Amino acid sequence: VNIPNVSRGAVINTGTVAVQAISVATGGALTIAAGATLSVNGSVEDGISNYGTVHNHGRIAIGSTTSIGRYGIYNNGGTFSNNAGCELKIDNCARVGFLIEAGTITNASKMEIGKDGSVGDECIVQGSGTFTNEATGLITADNVWYGGFRLRYGSFTNQGRIVIGTHNASDMRSGLMVFRTVFTNNGEIQIDKCSNSGIYLYHTDGSIQNNGIFKVGMLKPISKLLEVANDGRLFSNN
């Protein structure tokens, strides 16, 4: 399903709409209303490709019955809002649960990635752009082999709660990997079940500003709570 650049956009008002894949063009818009569901299963590439605007007020379920061939959500320059009282659930993806090449992501409710099925290498990869987890937001990241979050560029701010690895069938390599991203935690982050490191800080251009709470290795000991590599050094615990 392709949603083009049109003034009114597409709206799912009630019931469940089931598709194999959906793409929102630059200037296009998709809204899932409260009480409505968008179900995405069986795409050979990406479940949702967003270059425009997606507003979720209801429920989005990706990969719940049939796996996704590449990324659960691919966001490149678009705006994606998971609003209060809604749900986004991503499972069974071959590569990455949620890939952000660029754009603006806001989560004010529940975002579950990999809870009930592997999403491949990583749950969230941010190549650029801005990601905000609001005070009412909860993000869970599970069932990957490499990393929960890999943040390469841009900015990521957590005001709410992030839980990484608690539902892992086996250990991921690292829970939170920060490269050239400015990561600010004003909420609570829990990281568990990692074979190498809970937090991995890679580059001098990246930073972690902690004004909240980090809980690392609560369920199972992690050999390195914080790993610093390639001159990465700025972790501020306030």
Image (cartoon, helix red, strand yellow):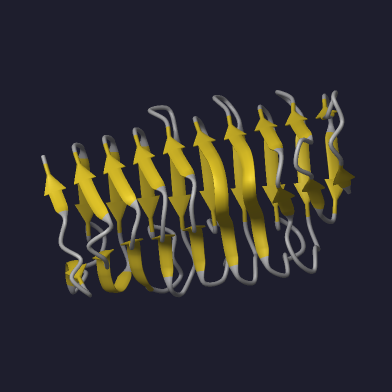
Q: Residue 223 is drawn in which quadrant? A: bottom left
Residue drawn 57% across the image and 28% down it: 83
- On the image, the x and y values in percent for residue 123 come to 50, 60
Q: Nearer the viewer, residue 217 or 52?
A: 52
Is residue 122 toward the left or the right of residue 50 in the image? left
Q: In this image, 69 relative to 107: left or right?
A: right
What is the x, y in percent for residue 53? 69, 35
| In-image side of 31 versus 57 (left or right) | right
**Residue at the image position 44 percent from the left and 59 percent from the top:** 167
Determine whether, in the image, residue 117 is placed left or right of residue 134: right
The image quadrant that residue 13 belongs to is top right
Q: Residue at x 43, y 27 (%)?
A: 136
Foreground of the two, 10 or 143: 10
Residue at x 22%, y 75% (from the top left corner): 230
Vertical order, 84 against 156 (above or below):
above
Query: In the picture, which quadrant includes the C terminus?
Result: top left
Q: In which image quadrant can residue 116 be found?
A: bottom right
